[in-house]
Image (cartoon, rainbow, N blue to C red):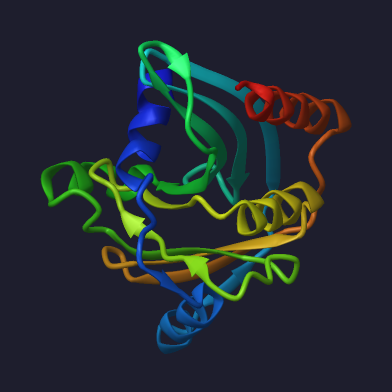
Amino acid sequence: MGGAAAIALMAPLAPLAPLAPLALLALLALASAHAETVQPDQVAYEMKVKEDPAAKACVLAVAIKQSADETVDFRLVVARMKRNDVVSGPPVFGFTIEVRDPHFALQRRSARAGGEVTSAAFISERYTAAARPRTTPAADGSWVASTLDTVEGGELIDAAAAGKFQIAYTRRRPIAARVFAVTSTPPRDVLLRFSGCIDGLQAIE
């Protein structure tokens, strides 16, 4: 994901999306589809800094792999927009969820964007904000959510940094409902660089 792509995900969401109890919505959606809880074979963390003329973002990327055929990409993003190439405005906290599977990649390209994955959610006991941002489909088929609330954003960061969370999603073709249970924490160096990036971003006046 390039700098422009990272900012494109956040910019349309800078105004708060409609809020809803995310965990409840996810559980209701997944219960009707008989969700399968999956322990991933591999969880890889990576920290990235994305910047272009429109914004600067700190990204904690998590690749959750179940098999050679399916990967869930979760990206935790803290960004600030730019004016006249200068960082300004409040930080935007958000995340993206993308399911990549070559078995339905071709169908997804020919169908309406986002038509295969019908819901996606980030769930964690540490993420206890009373009102959570509702995920919405993006043009590229991923699901995104964001908030300007610093308390809620802090809870989101803490939950992801703890390495104990779930990514739940449903899709239409082929029909599936899965909950990927992540239980491994990010490497210390990755967390330190992500935290340092956020501190630097928030310190800019």
Q: Looking at the image, is 75 positioned above or below residue 174? A: above
Question: Residue 5: horizontal and vertical position, in percent?
Answer: 36, 27
Residue closest to the far right: 188
Quarter of the rendering occupied by the C terminus? top right
Name the side, left or right, on which 5 lies relative to 121: left
Q: Looking at the image, is 80 positioned above or below residue 65? A: above
Quarter of the rendering occupied by the N terminus? top left
Q: Residue at x 69, y 35 (%)?
A: 45
Q: Looking at the image, is 11 positioned above or below residue 185? A: above
Question: Residue 147: horizontal and vertical position, in percent?
Answer: 49, 53
Could you tell me if residue 2 is visible in this image? no
Question: Residue 76: horizontal and vertical position, in percent?
Answer: 58, 42
Name the side, left or right, on which 176 lies relative to 194: left
Q: Total of numbered circles in the picture?
A: 0
- Front in this rendered view, residue 6 or 130: 130
Residue 106 image-quadrant placement: top left
Q: Residue at x 73, y 71 (%)?
A: 125
Q: Residue at x 50, y 50 (%)?
A: 148
Question: Residue 13: horizontal and vertical position, in percent?
Answer: 35, 47
- Front in this rendered view, residue 62 or 196: 196
